[in-house]
Amino acid sequence: MAKADIDFEKELWDAANELRGAVSENNYKNYILPLVFLKHLSERFEIVKEDLKNTLNEPGSEYYTTDKAEKEYVLADPDEYRSRNTFMIPHTASWQYLKDNAEQDDIKVIIDDAFDVIQELLTLYNPQLNNLLPRIFVKSELSAKQSGGIINLLSHPKFSEKENPESDILGRIYEYYIGRFAMAEGSGAGQFFTPGSIVRLLVELLEPYKGRIFDPACGSGGMFVQSLKFIKEHGGDKGDISIYGQEMTSQTLRLCLMNLLLRDLSFDIKLGNSLLDDKFPKLKADFVIANPPFNVSNWHPEDLPENDPRLFGPREEFTTDGSANYMWMQTFWNHLSDTGTAGIVMANGAMTSNTRGEKNVRQYMVDNGMVDCIVRMPDKLFLTTGIPACLFILSKNRDGKDGEHRERINEILFIDAAKMGTMASRKLRVFEDSDIDKIADTYHNWRTKGKSHEDVDGFCKAATLEEVQKQDYKLTPGIYVGTEAEEDDGIPFEEKMEGLKATLLEQFEKGENLKKEILANFDKF
């Protein structure tokens, strides 16, 4: 992660490195994150139990009693803990028990047994949480010493929620690990991780204070966690949002569920392919926030029903097997409420693609006033892909009838942020808070009633639909804001270099053959 807001990265990565040799780096998360999660549930139970004890002993409280049996009864009642958003954790599944037994030869069995106990509690509470903590330590190549070593490292007081109340310490550790594991995994991590500064920008643009938030490609749940942070920072109440998500892989779904449980959020997350098996067909969300996988080909649009309600027109003309980008767009639009807004991370190629099944959708979206804003982003924002990206903001409140936003049905705001951001490392760029504020303020000033917007050469421009139609529906901000309108095919530089090298070698070979032919012809004279 570029700039983690916690000061113990080294200790955390040391804990992960306990696994080195026995587990491949791209599997670290499957061992570390369940332990962080178990530690959270265990500590939360202890904190609530302590609060309950104090309440029982406090004259004037409705729980106050001097009866010892009554106190024991209340402290052993699982419902008392459920009503306080936690679980009653038996001693053998507690973090203290794992810590006390960290040096034992059978610590792997003890960990898996603790997972079993907690899994039973979770499944009883919500069947959706089934198989969240599978038995993975016993059958792993990890030694007892390595397994105990992770427990000892994670037991450091600075990693304790009890020692650091109100700090969301375990949530932040979980987030840190997801970022670090994404770096370790490289290209395979794109399915579950969106870099923090992109997520923050999307959330600041959309301002999801209250209502239903939906992410049909939710990965490890970063969009939801950032929405929660936004609400907290603005004095809102997390009880005002409800969260819905869909994720394709069961392993990533587990990460997401743990992430949300750590934050004590109410949610409905389902497993499945959102493109071909939409698990929330009736859901209308106030906010759709998503980073779907880019440029997915061979996704089988022929398997969609002819009259799929998401499609803007005939299936053959409004889908293509070459890329699912615009099927995602149609899915997001279909899930918006009457005044909802969607913020989507997209490959740059989506702004200009001329493939029939993509251009038809883009043209339809422009002509029907669906596109609110396009933000072109700089390169190197992603750890996991070299494909340059942009943001599409689609909105159903463009008629100005919701009382909050002005009427802008015939305009699209273009923002070119391609030169913004700061290099946090040789490979990774991040948006600073000032960058995020500048982009979000530009969008809010343009769309909000009573505020004023000014075009800025090279940065932003409110273009009319007619101007966009004249540019053959290309949505590249550079065309409108006055920066060079460079076409970006979305192919990473490294791949282009490989292609150029292959072409050059081929031409060298042809040149060599030609030289031989010419010399042979000279010999004939």
Image (tube, rainbow, N blue to C red):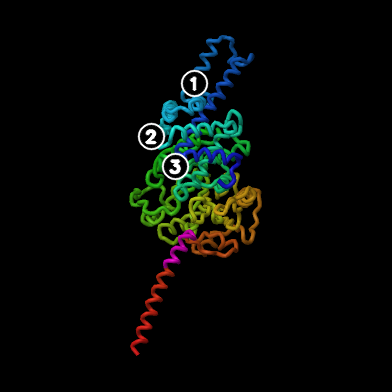
Residue drawn where x is 59% and y is 28% of the image: 162
If the image is split into quadrants, where does the C terminus sit? bottom left
Q: Circle 3 sits in a helix, a strand or a loop, which is it?
A: loop
Residue range in magenta is: 490-502
Q: Residues within 10 Å of mark 3 (few under 14, many from 20)?
A: few
Of labels 3 and 1, earlier in sequence is 3
Q: Is residue 152 in view from this perspective?
A: yes
- Mark 2 lies on residue: 139
Q: Which residue is mark 3?
A: 21
Tag 2 and tag 3, C-beta contact below 8 Å: no
Image location (x, y in percent) of residue 159:
57, 33
Q: Are dots 1 and 2 in contact, CB under 8 Å?
A: no
Give the left or right position of residue 521, taking residue 69 as reference: left
Residue at x 52% of width, y 54% of height: 390
Q: Which quarter of the figure has residue 248?
A: top left
Q: Main secondary structure of the magenta part?
A: helix
Of the two numbered discs 3 and 1 in the rendering, the one whose residue sits closer to the viewer? 3
Q: Amino acid at mark 1?
A: Asp
Q: CA distance from mark 1 to mark 2?
A: 35 Å
Residue 262 is inside the magenta segment: no
Where 39 falls versus 277 (above or below)?
above
Residue drawn at the location 55% of the way across and 62% of the way down: 467
The residue wearing badge 1 is 79
Nearer to us in this view, 331 or 158: 158
The kind of secondary structure element at disc 1 is helix
Dot 2: few (<14), some (14–19), or many (≥20) neighbours within 10 Å? few
